[in-house]
Image: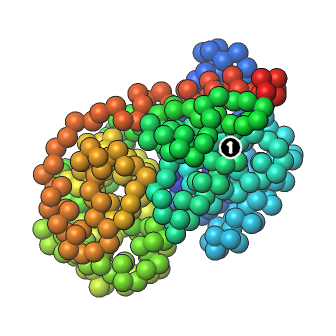
Amino acid sequence: MKITTIIGARPQFIKAATVSRAIAQQAQTGQQATPVEETIIHTGQHFDANMSEVFFQELDIPKPDYNLGIGGGSHGRNTGRMIEAIEDVLVREHPDWVLVYGDTDSTLAGALAAAKLHIPVAHVEAGLRSFNRIMPEEINRIVADQLSTLLFCPTRTAEENLGKEGFPHQLTAQTRQTVLNVGDVMYDAALYYGDRAQEKSRIMQPLALSPKAFVLATIHRAENTDNPERLQNIMTALNRIASEMPVVLPLHPRTKQKLVLADFSAVTFIDPLGYLDMVMLEKNARVIITDSGGVQKEAYFHGVPCVTVRDETEWVELVSAGVNYLAGGKKKNIVQAFQKMRDHVFDIENLYGNGSSARLIVEYLSSYSKAENLKQS
């Protein structure tokens, strides 16, 4: 069985690492009746070395078989160029499955290119909904779900979302789709890489940080960076919080372009981090303030309260559990949310599976091979 994995952004590198490792482990132990050959396409959506190359090194991801080098343009321009380039690779490789992750332009392009060639698509993180179609990520995930044969949901909420939209739980000739709740591969990654970060990362020392005595912030979503007033409010709030507790903010390239850093001198700005350094900061932060979907979950996995500077989140179960506070984009609300969450302590519940999501994904891909899909249809 041949799988072509399509990735382009750092959260996808983390997710893909867990599945690639599961493929290798099952091959080594002989658990898999059908041999699996994986081909990796890196679109180049994240082209900064700190946001791409270092991840492959740290996560032990096989080097991409194809690096398309497409990034830095508008959503439409990037997606169009990716579809064309991915299509060329898929025609050459002729895989049984195309595996896409999350909600990026790379995900959308991969799903579209595969669907046009009648190659089954498997979508990891299917069923997530923010119900805000202004977000490009929402459009990407909705379209990717519509084009997918196997929809791998990370949570019960995601599974329920797809049920409400009419997606089936059984593969048939009519639907050619099925919903499967496998848990979250990000939890697999948190379990596997958490100890490695503790052993290998030295990021705390040069930043002079003490455990549980600083705030980690990440800001990169277009809804925040492309709205000058909203970005100003968020950064002013972080600057205010930094007067109480150090705030460390790894700067995403998009955010860096929009800011005059001198205006927020209380915040400690640093370059984008490798994954292990980022995990180390997440594990040791007192509070995490973010607009990243992945970082919201990682905060939970590491037992750190989170403040989300968005008006909605796909990870509603974290809000319901009281470990993630939706603060929006107003300065007052963000500061108050930080003050509310900084002393919050919680136990991690089984919201995202048991750490075996990647193994389940590989098993399902093997059992629902392309030939079997047609026979069962």
Mark 1 crowdedness (10 Å alpha carbons): few <14, some 14-19, many ≥20? many
Q: Position of residue 165 (x, y in %)?
A: 57, 46
Horizontal side of 103 relative to 93 (left or right) equals left
Q: Position of residue 213 (x, y in %)?
A: 16, 56
Instruction: Note whether 204 is above or below 1 in the view shown.
Output: below
Which corner quadrant of the image does residue 351 belong to?
top left
Task: Using the image as rendered, state which of residue 75 and residue 149 is in the foreground.
Answer: 149
Which corner quadrant of the image does residue 86 belong to?
bottom right
Q: Amino acid at mark 1?
A: Ser
Residue depicted at x 64% and y 14% = 30
Q: Which residue is mark 1?
A: 148
Q: Secondary structure at mark 1?
A: loop
Task: Using the image as rendered, state which of residue 337 and residue 279 is in the foreground.
Answer: 337
Display coloring:
rainbow
Instruction: Note whether 336 is above or below 25 in the view shown.
Output: below
Q: Position of residue 205 (x, y in %)?
A: 25, 55
Residue depicted at x 30% and y 50% = 319
Horizontal side of 233 relative to 143 (left or right) equals left
Which corner quadrant of the image does residue 4 belong to?
top right
Residue depicted at x 34% and y 31% = 350
**Observer able to see residue 72:** yes
Instruction: Note whether 280 is above or below 72 in the view shown.
Output: above
**Observer able to see residue 67:** no
Horizontal side of 132 relative to 139 (left or right) equals left
Residue depicted at x 20% and y 74% = 332
**Quadrant of the snapshot with the C terminus:** top right
**Quadrant of the snapshot with the N terminus:** top right
Q: Position of residue 136 (x, y in %)?
A: 56, 65
